[in-house]
Structure formats: structure tokens, C-alpha cells
Image (cartoon, helix red, strand yellow):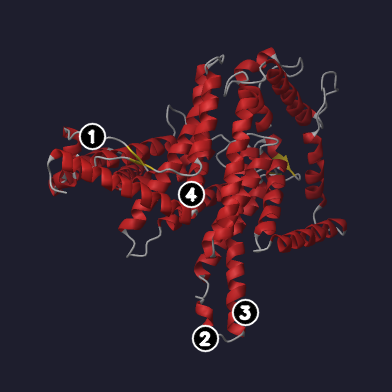
């Protein structure tokens, strides 16, 4: 933990002090809210009452605001205004976190493993913005990464405090965080399934198989929607694999009639079926998005899950080879639909490089050539500014100077985040980004090797999530529509799973803080 100097006692700190919150304040607040609700129609009073409840809960526990931000974050693409719901709840949650620190006259900043690589990448990206064509575009991108870092620290700090205060009650805030993550994915999955086969209509260019429409949720585009749904589907798959492992061990112990069954508790069947249901619905949503990028990243994530599922890597490699053989055999004998096979195998067209100037544009190759043209523009930016690029977030403002004749309009990004980052931040920024994700993968694998039970399943699912995100970024950019709120919470979840290392750091930091507080009281002449 990093200690900040104690704040002097002010009117604000006295007002937020627990001793100052008398029942009269709550009665007055209830009267005011009730008066407003009476004046509004039911369609508006209901949401207002719900938002008021969320804000009050956030003042009590800042994690409540983060949970609300996770649920409402995907609505950002369809909401108009300065702040969408996800950003509003996130900002209020961070302010409440700060207020709690001010009330207690100290602020804890957890020293997490990922804080340094995250800050390093954000710092280098900030340097590139200094000479960028548009500060507005650059600051928007920087804000995303600053939010991810802040969310990670918020999750670690508040969950740790929650665990200490409610240790005897058995409450597990990590479970509630997982519930919020799954609830956000489930709501989007249900909407996507409705859009695909139940609504009966949709955008004409989303029509597939002659009668269905690609699912896109509230993202307005199937590709980022499919990438978002992978976060839920892959995380759920990892937890399910851990449950299967525990069920297998439990049944084996039962057969051997061990007493008391090797101290093993029976599996939590309710949690197993709940996670299984959410995962199944999320997988359906990924398929219904009809996104090749989402499908390929899901396949890569599943392969990573199988590889690291057993305790021994060679066993995972054998399972992976067996699964690949079964999948290949199924496609050969027609068990896999031809439309799906064709959709996946045509993916190689999206990954080829080359000069697309002079290419004949048809309806069949339009999407591929458009993507390649934007890759070519990104490479042109990188050649002119190799070290620090054209500025973080400035691909779109700089695109006009590098656009090909047949492709004058920017898509917002290069549809390959690595090329996009190389163009915007140069070699230095791309190197810092790769270093960050190397640290993420390394820490996740370390947690998998040290964990057991459902914690190992969560870590396994996180490894799959990082894999899906890394692969999908070959053809798209997923840091859109508040997905980074989910990623910040997942980063925080990873730090919490690294329990042994984290507890050692927290104990040492808090012990140091207590020693400094005693010295401060001694200097003031007060009793220690």
C-alpha cells in the first residue's frame, strides 16, 4: 500500500463521519425523494427510484456502483449524452471510494503486480499524444486505460476490506463480483438470441442463412458484440472445467469408500448448473453473432483451457491433440455444418498482407479489401513515425494523409489492434503493450499452478479470456463500448486470486502504515 499524508479535519469529513449521520437525515432524504416521485409519471419514477437506491448503496459500498457500471456499460453505444450510464456509475463509484478514504483520513493504493506494466503503457501512450493531431481523440483513449487501472485498484482494495470486515459471516465478495460479470453477459446474450431468431427482422446486411439476423446486442455491431460475449462464455467454461475436475475427484473418492472421503466436500451442484446455464447461453450468443473473429478467438481460448486444465502440461497437450482430431473428423464426415466450416476456413483471407491498390472490388471481397486497405494505411503511419507513432487514439485523424484512393473513409481503427497501436504509438508503445500482456499471462499461469477448486477454475477462465482477446485483436479492436470496464474488473479479480503474494504485500504495507501512525501520534504528544 502507498500512504498519502493524513487530511486535515474539514467540514466535509465531519459531515461524512458516521457519528454525524443521524436518522433525521435519512427521513429528510426520504421525504425529498418521495416528493419528486409523486410528481413524476410511473414510467419515470421507477427508474429514478432504482438509480437513487444504487447511488445510496454506492455511498455505503463503492463496489455497488462498479457492479451497476458492469451491468449498464454495454448500453454506451445506444445512449446519447456526455456520460452514459456505465461511465456515470463508474465515476460515482470512484468518487465514493475516494470519499471513504477521506472519511478515514487515509488512502490505500494497493501495490498490485499489474499496476506497473499498466502505468508504463499508459505513460508511454500519454507521451505520444503530446505531438498528436488531435488531443481530444488521444485523451479519450488514455481515459480508458486510466479507468482500467483505477477499477483494478478499487476492486482489490474494497474486496480486501470487505473480506476483513465480514470474515466470520462467510460472505465472499469475489463471488458477488463474478455474479455481476455473469449478469452483464447474460443480459446481452438474451438480447442477442432474441435478435437472431426470435425477433424476425433486423438490418438487411446482417441477414445470414436466408432467414436469421446476426446478433449484435446493444453494440450495434456483431463483431465487438461477439468479442464481449466471449468474456462471459470463456470465463464460464474455465469454471465449469474446474467443477468437472472436482466432481471427478469426489466420485473417485466415493468409489474407494474413503472415510471421510479424503476430507472432500460434495460439489456445489447449484453453482455448477447456474454457471453451466449462463455459459451455454453466452456460447449461443457468440455463435449467433456470426463473427469469424469471435469464433476464431473462442476456438483459441478453448484450446488454451484444454491445455492448462490438467495439472501436467503433457496431459493437456494430449487432450488438445485428441480434441483437434475429433473436430477435424467431425468436419470431414459432415457433423459440423458446411456454412460454419466455410465461415471459419475463409478466415485466412482476412489475415493476408499485400498492396490492395488496383484490386477489383466486388461484393464478395469488399470487406476483406477494406480491412487490408486500413492495415496498409496503418503501416504507412508506422513507417513515417516509427518510434512514437502519430499519437495514441489518432489513427482516425491521421487517416486522411494515408488513405488509399478507393478507401477515403476511416473506420475508426485499423481492424487490427496491433497494427493500430504500432501506427499510433510506434515501436515503444507496442513494446509496452506486449510487455503488459506478457505480465498478464505470466501472472495468470502462476495463479493456475498455485490454486485449487473454483479459484483455479476462475484463473483458468481468465487465461482463456486473455487468449480470446489477444486473438480477436488480430482483426478488430475491442476497447470499445465500455468493454474496458469489464477488463478492469477482470484485472482486479486476477490480483485477488494471487492470494499468497497479495496477502504478504498487504500485511507488510499495513504494518508499515500502523508504525507510521504510531510515530505521528507520538510526535503530537497523544497516547499510542
Q: Which numbered disc, 1 or 4, marks the residue that appears first in the sequence?
A: 1
Query: Percent x, y for residue 524?
Result: 14, 39
Relative to 113, is 395 on the left or the right? right
Q: Which numbered disc, 2 or 1, marks the residue that appears first in the sequence?
A: 1
- Mark 1 surroundings: few (<14), some (14-19) or many (≥20) residues within 10 A: some
CA distance for labels 1 and 3: 58 Å
For label 1, the SS is loop
Observer-nearest of 517 and 391: 517
CA distance for labels 2 and 3: 12 Å
CA distance for labels 1 and 4: 29 Å
For label 3, the SS is helix
In the image, residue 478 above or below residue 265: above
- For label 1, the residue is 7
- Mark 3 surroundings: few (<14), some (14-19) or many (≥20) residues within 10 A: few
Q: Which quadrant holds residue 247?
A: bottom right
Residue shown at the point (68%, 44%) measured from the top left: 294
Is the N terminus in the top left, top right, bottom left or bottom right quadrant? top left
In the image, residue 134 above or below residue 183: above
- For label 4, the residue is 495
- For label 2, the residue is 259
Relative to 495, is 99 on the left or the right? left
Cβ atoms at labels 1 and 3 below 8 Å apart: no
Residue shown at the point (78%, 35%) measured from the top left: 351
Nearer the observer, disc 2 or disc 3? 2
CA distance for labels 2 and 1: 58 Å
Residue shown at the point (60%, 27%) measured from the top left: 429
In the image, residue 112 above or below residue 379: below
- For label 3, the residue is 252
Amino acid at each position: 500500500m502507498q500512504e498519502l499524508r493524513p487530511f486535515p479535519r474539514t467540514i466535509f469529513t465531519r459531515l461524512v463521519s458516521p457519528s454525524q449521520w443521524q436518522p433525521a437525515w435519512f427521513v429528510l432524504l426520504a421525504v425529498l425523494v418521495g416528493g419528486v416521485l409523486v410528481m413524476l409519471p410511473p414510467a419515470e419514477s421507477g427508474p429514478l427510484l432504482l438509480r437513487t437506491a444504487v447511488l445510496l448503496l454506492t455511498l455505503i459500498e463503492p463496489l455497488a456502483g462498479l457492479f451497476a457500471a458492469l451491468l449498464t456499460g454495454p448500453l454506451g453505444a445506444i445512449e446519447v449524452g456526455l456520460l452514459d450510464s456505465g461511465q456515470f456509475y463508474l465515476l460515482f463509484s470512484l468518487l465514493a471510494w475516494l470519499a471513504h478514504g477521506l472519511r478515514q483520513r487515509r488512502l490505500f493504493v494497493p501495490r498490485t503486480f499489474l499496476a506497473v506494466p499498466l502505468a508504463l503503457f499508459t505513460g508511454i501512450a500519454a507521451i505520444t499524444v503530446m505531438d498528436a493531431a488531435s488531443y481530444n481523440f488521444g485523451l479519450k483513449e488514455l481515459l480508458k486505460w486510466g479507468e482500467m487501472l483505477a477499477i483494478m485498484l478499487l476492486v482489490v482494495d474494497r474486496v480486501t476490506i470487505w473480506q476483513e470486515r465480514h470474515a466470520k459471516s462467510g460472505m465472499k465478495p469475489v463471488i458477488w463480483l463474478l455474479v455481476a460479470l455473469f449478469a452483464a453477459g447474460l443480459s446481452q446474450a438474451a438480447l442477442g438470441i432474441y435478435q437472431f431468431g426470435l425477433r424476425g427482422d433486423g438490418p438487411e446486411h446482417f441477414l445470414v442463412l436466408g432467414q436469421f439476423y446476426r446478433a449484435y446486442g446493444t453494440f450495434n455491431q456483431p463483431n465487438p458484440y461477439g468479442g464481449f460475449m466471449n468474456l462471459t462464455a470463456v470465463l464460464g467454461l474455465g469454471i465449469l472445467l474446474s467443477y468437472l475436475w472436482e466432481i471427478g475427484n469426489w466420485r473417485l473418492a466415493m468409489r474407494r469408500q474413503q472415510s471421510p472421503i479424503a476430507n472432500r466436500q460434495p460439489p456445489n451442484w447449484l453453482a455448477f448448473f447456474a454457471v453451466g446455464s449462463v455459459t451455454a447461453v453466452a456460447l449461443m450468443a457468440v455463435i449467433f453473432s456470426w463473427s469469424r473473429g469471435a469464433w476464431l478467438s473462442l476456438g483459441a481460448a478453448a484450446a488454451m483451457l484444454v491445455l492448462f486444465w490438467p495439472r501436467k502440461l503433457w496431459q493437456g497437450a494430449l487432450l488438445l491433440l485428441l480434441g483437434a482430431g475429433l473436430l477435424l473428423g467431425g468436419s470431414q464426415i459432415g457433423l459440423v455444418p458446411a456454412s460454419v466450416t466455410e465461415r471459419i476456413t475463409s478466415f485466412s483471407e482476412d489475415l493476408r498482407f499485400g498492396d490492395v491498390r488496383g484490386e477489383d472490388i466486388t461484393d464478395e471481397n469488399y470487406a476483406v479489401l477494406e480491412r487490408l486497405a486500413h492495415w496498409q494505411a496503418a503501416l504507412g503511419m508506422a513507417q513515417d513515425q516509427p518510434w512514437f507513432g502519430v499519437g495514441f487514439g489518432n489513427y482516425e485523424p491521421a487517416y486522411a494523409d494515408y488513405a488509399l484512393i478507393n478507401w477515403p473513409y476511416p473506420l475508426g481503427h485499423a481492424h487490427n489492434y496491433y497494427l493500430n497501436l504500432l501506427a499510433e504509438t510506434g515501436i515503444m508503445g507496442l513494446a509496452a503493450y506486449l510487455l503488459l500482456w506478457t505480465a498478464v499471462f505470466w501472472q495468470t499461469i502462476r495463479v493456475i499452478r498455485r490454486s485449487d477448486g473454483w479459484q483455479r477454475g476462475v484463473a483458468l477462465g481468465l487465461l482463456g479470456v486473455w487468449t480470446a482477446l489477444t486473438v480477436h485483436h488480430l482483426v478488430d479492436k475491442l476497447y470499445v463500448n465500455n468493454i474496458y470496464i469489464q477488463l478492469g474488473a477482470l484485472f482486479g479479480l486476477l490480483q485477488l486470486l494471487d492470494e499468497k503474494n497479495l496477502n504478504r504485500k498487504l500485511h507488510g504495507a499495513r504494518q508499515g502504515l500502523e508504525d507510521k501512525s504510531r510515530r505521528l501520534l507520538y510526535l503530537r504528544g497523544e497516547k499510542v
